């Protein structure tokens, strides 16, 4: 019964996403055409994600361990579900942000328009393209944007919920710009929506439990080596997973 329900619920989610995407596509696109109006698109993304969550029966229950700093800052989180992206807009509706995300998203019709004009594609093979991504992220922070990075480098479906080793990008970015890091643990997103492309993957409505940990302030970021900051962040995010 769970598999049957999941199948129809995933179809409903896909239809819901498609219909709302068409609804918001034009106003978002018009705002993304100009650099000086990009941030005005952010409230629309927030409303869009709230609408999807409401209609899909999702509710986010965050536990904030520390007051959120003033923007800009770098957000880092474990990555276990596509819902991680949607829920970020519910957690930080007053802090305009963009994502460093896999370049494969550029292949999805309509979505690629938003991604190309607002977010920053990351190419897994690294090299010059990876350097360009970090340069674009530096520029975004200087323009007042917060930047979200999933430091595991993607969803490791067969290893969830275990936290995988972090890549360096988020921590170099924070150091280069002297900004704090905000670590986040998504506790059960994977239980709500697994990879829809995987046969018999589960999906259901429910409450998402999230822990927003105490920040790694910019003094700590600037006074420590990248490896040290990375270890602090890993332990902070992993602590919630280990106590689940």
Image (cartoon, rainbow, N blue to C red):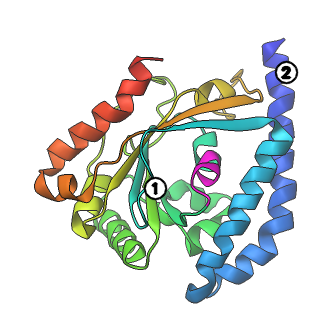
Residue 91 in magenta? yes
Picture coordinates of residue 75, whole percent (x, y) = 42, 53
Q: Is residue 165 left or right of residue 137?
A: left
Answer left or right for 230 relative to 109.
Answer: left
Residue, disc 1: 148
Structural crowding at the residue carrying mark 1, measured as other residues with C-alpha within 10 Å and reported as few (<14), some (14–19) or many (≥20): many
Q: Quadrant of residue 93?
A: bottom right
| Residue 110 in view (yes/no) | no
Per the image, label 2 sits on a secondary structure element best described as helix
Above/below status of 9 relative to 130: above
Residue that lies at the very extreme toward the front in this rendered image: 67
Task: Residue 118: give x, y in percent of width and height.
Answer: 56, 71
Residue at 65 percent across and 85 percent down: it is 33
Q: Is residue 132 magenta?
A: no
Q: Position of residue 213 (x, y in %)?
A: 40, 39
Distance from disc 1 to disc 2, alpha carbons, whole Å, reads 32 Å
Tell me where residue 205 sits by quadrant. top right
Identify the disc placed on residue 51. Answer: none
Query: What residue would you read off at disc 2?
Result: 5
Identified at 41% across, 67% down, the residue is 72
Nearest the viewer among 5 and 171 is: 171
Marks 1 and 2 in Cβ contact (< 8 Å): no
Q: Main secondary structure of the magenta part?
A: helix
Residue 196 placement, left or right of 184: right
Stretch in magenta: 87-93
């Amino acid at each position: 019964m769970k598999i049957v329900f999941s199948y129809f619920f995933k179809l409903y989610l896909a239809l819901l996403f498609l219909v709302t995407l068409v609804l918001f596509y034009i106003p978002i696109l018009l705002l993304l055409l100009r650099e000086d109006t990009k941030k005005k698109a952010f409230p629309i993304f927030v409303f869009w994600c709230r609408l999807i969550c409401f209609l899909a029966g999702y509710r986010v229950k965050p536990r904030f361990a520390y007051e959120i700093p003033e923007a800009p800052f770098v957000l880092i989180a474990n990555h276990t579900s596509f819902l991680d992206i949607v829920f970020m807009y519910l957690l930080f509706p007053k802090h305009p942000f963009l994502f460093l995300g896999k370049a494969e998203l550029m292949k999805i019709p309509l979505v690629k328009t938003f991604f190309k004009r607002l977010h920053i594609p990351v190419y897994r093979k690294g090299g010059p393209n990876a350097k360009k991504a970090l340069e674009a992220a530096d520029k975004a922070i200087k323009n007042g944007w917060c930047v979200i990075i999933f430091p595991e480098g993607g969803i490791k479906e067969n290893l969830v919920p275990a936290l995988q080793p972090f890549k360096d990008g988020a921590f170099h970015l924070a150091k280069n710009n002297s900004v704090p890091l905000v670590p986040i643990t998504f506790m059960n997103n994977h239980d709500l929506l697994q990879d829809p492309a995987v046969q018999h993957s589960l999906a259901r409505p429910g409450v998402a439990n999230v822990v927003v940990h105490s920040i790694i302030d910019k003094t700590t970021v600037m006074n420590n080596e990248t490896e040290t900051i990375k270890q602090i962040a890993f332990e902070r995010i992993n602590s919630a997973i280990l106590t689940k």
